[in-house]
Amino acid sequence: MPESDSLTKPKRPRSTELISWNVNGIRAVMKKGFVEFLTAQNADIVCLQETKAHEEQIPKLEIPYPYQYYHAAEKKGYSSTAILSKREAIAVDTSFPDTAKHPQEGRVQAAEFEDYYLVNVYVPNSQDGLRRLDYRTQQFDADFRVLLSNLAKDKPVAVCGDFNVAHKEIDIARPKANRRNAGFTDEERESFTQHLESGLIDTFREIHPDALEQYTWWSFRGGARARNVGWRIDYWLISTELQPKLKDAFILDQVMGSDHCPVGIELKLKL
């Protein structure tokens, strides 16, 4: 976790900066410089995944954002998401996915702002033995695309989060060794391709199409992060209508505190 601005992104003339980070437990990361990171980075909106907490368990007064939106899983200490914002959202919908088809795991928030919808997602992991692969690709991903398509009929969307998939071989340090492992199956990669084909842009690859060894998650095992044996599984996707507004996309891989690092974009539009 940075001790100064040296590990945060250099500031440029003002635009809307959006950050996404799987914190692997918000109460744990609060003890590892999380508030200091938020203060130094000073992003307009920060989306969090895997907060692993209900709202009443979070020290909200310590977090330097006036508007905080939380979506907790029914199971305590599991999954869950949050949006921290400098400006109040017009509305925040946490009704997806519906209880009839999906377990309530606090995985999706859709916040409406003046010019766009912001969607924060923590996509289910397919798990060891791929026991959740069918649910993840055939139900969750499929229904998630319907949600995004419906929102996009009204306003463009900016979608962020932990998608639990490395899309291309360039997005994973060891593609051959991980074929058929959760997060790099053909089914998961194809499902992510379908996200893009539905009218979304992978912002990092839009700005950095050929950048190598750019990862957002590293196993805690075997010193993977120190050796940069990682996966790029955290994304910012935007509607094609927002492409002219995309100013930058970046990975803050020097920021510690989780097994993931923050990822961000700058958009030339109102918060």
Image (cartoon, helix red, strand yellow):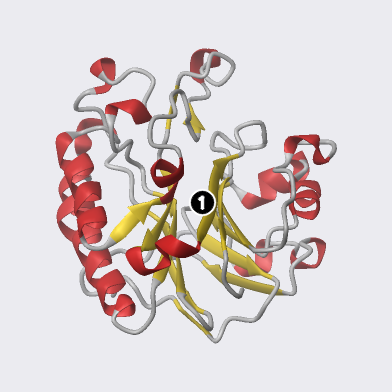
Q: Give the x, y percent position of residue 4.
A: 85, 38
In the image shown, does 37 or 246 lie closer to the viewer?
246
Q: Quadrant of residue 43?
A: bottom right
- Residue 82 in the figure: left or right of residue 125: right
Work out which quarter of the rendered image holds the N terminus and state it: top right
In the image shown, does 198 or 139 lie closer to the viewer?
198
- At 46% from the left and 76% from the top, the residue drawn is 116
Is 215 placed above or below 55 here?
above
- Residue 247 in the figure: left or right of residue 17: left
Q: Give the x, y percent position of residue 196.
A: 26, 54
Q: Report whether residue 50 is seen.
A: yes
Q: Give the x, y percent position of residue 29.
A: 68, 44
Q: Quadrant of residue 110?
A: bottom left
- Residue 131 in the figure: left or right of residue 269: left
Is 91 placed above or below 255 here?
below
Dot 1 corresponds to which residue? 50
Q: Report whether residue 1 is seen.
A: no
Mark 1, Cα crowd under 10 Å, few <14 / some 14-19 / many 20+, is many
Work out which quarter of the rendered image holds the C terminus and state it: bottom right
- At 20% from the left and 56% from the top, the residue drawn is 197
Q: Give the x, y percent position of residue 105.
A: 40, 61
* Three-letter amino acid code of the residue under disc 1: Glu
- At 36% from the left and 66% from the top, the residue drawn is 104
Question: Which element type, helix, strand or loop, lies under badge 1?
Answer: loop
Is 34 placed above or below 231 here?
below
Q: How many marks?
A: 1
- Residue 95 in the figure: left or right of residue 193: right
